[in-house]
Image (cartoon, helix red, strand yellow):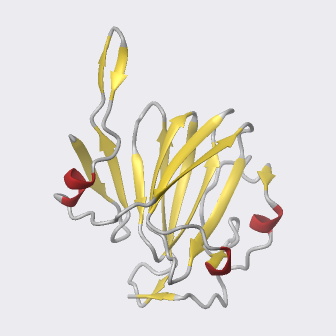
Amino acid sequence: MGVTIEKTELDGVLLITPDKFGDERGFFSETYNAAALRTHGIEAEFDQDNHSFSATPGTLRGLHFQRAPTAQTKLVRVTRGSVLDVAVDIRTGSPTYGRHVAAELSADNWTQILVPAGFAHGFCTLEPDTEVLYKVDAPYAPQDEGGLRWDDPDLGIQWPEFAGAVLSQRDGEWPSFTGFASPFSV
């Protein structure tokens, strides 16, 4: 697997762009190769794939995380459309606690984001009919799920103007960052 890996300002959050080879037939890309990623220090063992479809631009999913024992590392990519993808450091004791990174992931740029356990994660669709696929290294466990308000001003996330046009009731009810008791630490 040929891959470009870019570090972000948050330790452990990586942007990963697999090589993509095109010809008159279309393209080929090895989007995931555990052995190749291990050579770059990525040790996650993924055991579940998730796929979301959002018809409307401005659909917002997040900010989500799972507590131990089912805390999740995610490897997120877009196969159709585009998203603004966000990871927030929620590890107490981290020098970047409460800070976030945002990256545009799209079918065109082929970039993926690795979001380790200890980060809240969410995304906002930028185009109609966007499809997001992501690998997780622990199964979904509703008893361990948590979240933060996507529009909390203390987080300072610069979402697109139309973000939250489509939002689940649950995502609209997550608590704010102020007073948040994180289950993660460094």
Side (left or right) of 5 relative to 173: left
> Taking 18 as reference, is 108 above or below it?
above
Could you tell me how many numbered marks the image carries?
A: 0
- Above-or-below relation of 164 to 9: above
**Residue at left offset 67%, top offset 91%:** 179
Q: Quadrant of residue 56?
A: top right
What x and y, as percent, mark residue 48? 49, 58
Residue 9: give x, y in percent of width and height.
36, 66
Q: Quadrant of the C terminus?
A: bottom left
Of residues 170 and 103, which is closer to you in this image?
170
Residue farthest toward the right in the current orientation of the protein: 169
Residue ID at (24%, 45%): 4
Residue extending furthest toward the top: 24
Which part of the image, by quadrant, shows the N terminus?
top left
Q: Is residue 16 left or right of residue 122?
A: left
* Residue 127 in sight here: no
Q: Is residue 13 left or right of residue 71?
A: left
* In this view, 99 is above or below 56: below
Q: Position of residue 160 (x, y in %)?
A: 65, 48
For the point 49% across and 45% down, the residue is 104
Can residue 141 be spotted in the picture? yes
Which residue is at the front of the view, 119 or 133? 133
Quarter of the view holding residue 113: bottom left
Residue nearer the viewer, 167 or 158? 167
Side of 26 relative to 98 (left or right): left
Residue 20 in the image: x percent, y percent?
30, 30
User: Which residue is at a point 64% across and 50% down the rendered structure image?
Assistant: 124
